[in-house]
Image (cartoon, rainbow, N blue to C red):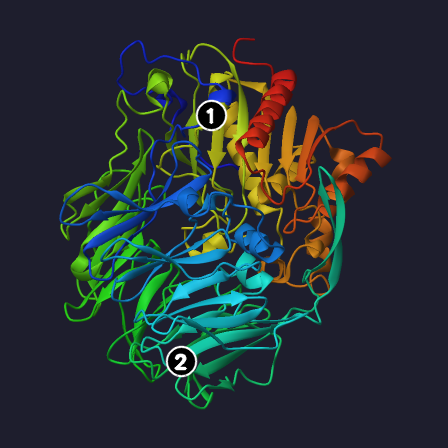
Amino acid sequence: MKASLLVAASTVALIALASPASAQEHLTPERVFANPSLNGPTARAVTLSPDGELVAYLLPRQDDVDVLDLWAAPVEGGEPFRLVDARALVPDAGDLSEAEVARRERMRISQRGVVEYAWDDQGRFILTPLEGDVFLANREDGSVRRLTETEADEIDAKVSPQGNYVSWVRDQDLVVYDLTNSREIPITYDGEGTTTWATAEFIAQEEMDRDTGYWWSPNERFIAMTRVDESGVDIIPRLDIQGSGATTIEQRYPRAGRPNAVVQVWVHDMDVGDRRQVDLGENEDIYVARVDWSNDSRTLYVQRQSRDQRTLELLAVNPRTGESRLVLTETNEHWVELTHDFTPLDDGGFLWSSDRDGNLHLYRYGADGALINQVTQGDWPIRGVERVDEAAGLVWFGGSVEDPTQQHLYVTALDGSGEPRQVTSGQGWWTIDVGEGGVFVGNYSDPSTPPNTALYGTDGQRLRWIEANALDESHPYWPYVGRHTTPTYGTIQAEDGSDLWYQILTPPDFDPARRYPAIVEVYGGPGVQRVTRGWQSIASRLYLEAGYVVFRLDNRGSSNRSADFQTALDRHLGTVEVDDQLTGLEWLRSQPFVDPERVGVTGWSYGGFMTLMMMTDPRFNLAAGASGAPVSEWSLYDTHYTERFMGTPEGNAEGYAASDVLNRLENLEGRLLIMHGMADDNVIFEHATRVINGLQERSQPFEMMLWPGQRHGVRGNPRQLLQWRTWLDFFGRELGSGED
């Protein structure tokens, strides 16, 4: 039963930014995918130096938004300056190795230039891997030292905590560079074939949010590192189809129910030059989820996750012997969600997060694993620990206390006393990097404010701009401000009474007396939130300019909600989330300004799967759908993601069969467009070819756009321009426009 509407349609209105009448240009695909970016100069990967004196960040170049440079700004004032000019150091970027391409794909890095960097713990150096080589910027004099110039790629480069070494992985082995003596020290020698040292395996990168395979101890004596053996993982022949031809790649891809890589943890002792294997138990069919060091370097902490992901254990390891002891066990009848909230404390204890009380909250434990106190509580989840000040007895964390569409910084007492204090202001979306004493760098946006970055004090007051990104006459988006509309937000009730947050955008020159075609932008998968009060996608505004109403809804399974809300789809993907999207669609069709016969849906990845599920469900009666890189059968997808929500194909045959798109194609209604990268190594191309073949066997008309050389996303302005031209043409033919 569809429950009641909480926000009425009468509240939907055009909200435009104040601007002169001259700023009324129509947004075009050609301008969206041209330089400079219409988002303005948006700082990325912003961090405070460990000493709190400098802010570092990445900025796209004005002449090429796909290339990033490293910038810095003094905290006490002064003009920002470019610390590393990517094209000055490496004018000819060249091609990256397959290993580095795959790693960047897992990290969703599409740019070139300086795509990541790292400080030493004293803030003296900034390490900048650049186009496969390693550079070290000296904070004091601004000089940049090139450490490598080899044919091979040096990947996952790090500067050691005290700044005496730089490390990287080359040809599947770990190498340490002694900065004092300017010499390389090989740490491992036998990385070859299916054996790799110090590198996160495919599953860790793609699904576990662990993109490294080695960790320095704070005192620089020890390096913990993984040894990955993929010999037991199935080989999935994948045609890497490029514009110039095709290459068969024998990809090690662990499909649901099939063997994973065997991951060990070893500790190398820099003082004596040997290493010890960490005791992770007799069962090798586990996940190495997280690895951390105690602040005094005496203990290595390893989070061991069971294959079924219902158990997460914290092990304390003696780095000199490799011996381990069990400190804490977290269990859940659905799954234990991995976080980065584990925080070692100086007293030997630690912070831990758990959703055992119905929402994700923080808990403080002693060194023996005994619970000391619950730190946060309430009918809302935290979003991650930002910093701990043990001396002051405070912890800063991100969260959404007021409603899940906003994200703010909060501070609360470490002993759990009192209520959290909201530090940031506004009704938008903040990302934070907290420094010593609670001073923080904050990146803020809302539907009317493009991302801006500043330094803030403990009271939330701005101390200085880092990148103001003011939406004024000098901003690249200024000519279009007069036609800018902001979303209306509200909630609709799901069948179980849950509040489903939505946002709806109306076209410029909106006339509530008219009826417009509508497009539902869907993702729908677990662990993702699409309805936020942040700056909205510029590209999606092309739908508005074409005269469409655009609708998004976060169904059950979406992130940043209660445990019950997120686990509602356990063991049956493609059910409750589809039902919730139907509830949203029924509400959308009931709005007097929406033409109920002209509604389409589009989504990518899980959203592509949802598009197919909705198009093959007669309840939706959609006119058109564009499915990008869709999962079509979950037994073809990877272990950690799929088994978390579905179990194994052997243990949940009914659930897997019900979510197989091929079994539903006879119910397809409306015109379908399929897009897929022909070199996709995540949702492999086979997912699309199954659907294509199934439609052809049924003589079912459809449209298709394939992308040679592209992986799970379409990269580069020319291809993205064509992607959007294709979508606009497709929906224009099938739905008409707002002028019809």
Residue 559: percent from left, percent from top: 45, 50
Report if residue 313 is visible in the image: no
In this picture, residue 660 sits left or right of residue 571: right
Q: Quadrant of residue 86?
A: top left
Q: Position of residue 394 (x, y in %)?
A: 19, 64
Q: Amino acid at mark 1?
A: Val
Residue 200 versus residue 385: which sits nearer the camera?
200
Label 1 or label 2, whichever comes before in sequence order: 1
> Would you say 392 lies left or right of 639 here?
left
Up/down of 314 relative to 81, above or below:
below
- SS assignment at label 2: strand
Residue designated by label 2: 222
Toward which corner of the image does residue 471 lie, by quadrant?
top left
Contact? badges 1 and 2 (CB < 8 Å): no
Q: Residues within 10 Å of mark 2 (few under 14, many from 20)?
A: many
Task: Identify residue for label 1.
Answer: 32
Among the 4 quarters of the image, the one containing residue 178: bottom left
**At 80% across and 29% down in the image, what residue appears?**
700
* Within-10-Å neighbours for mark 1: few <14, some 14–19, many 20+: many
Q: Estimate the x, y position of residue 483 in percent, counting from the top left.
A: 37, 16
SS for dot 1: helix
Quadrant for the N terminus, please: top right
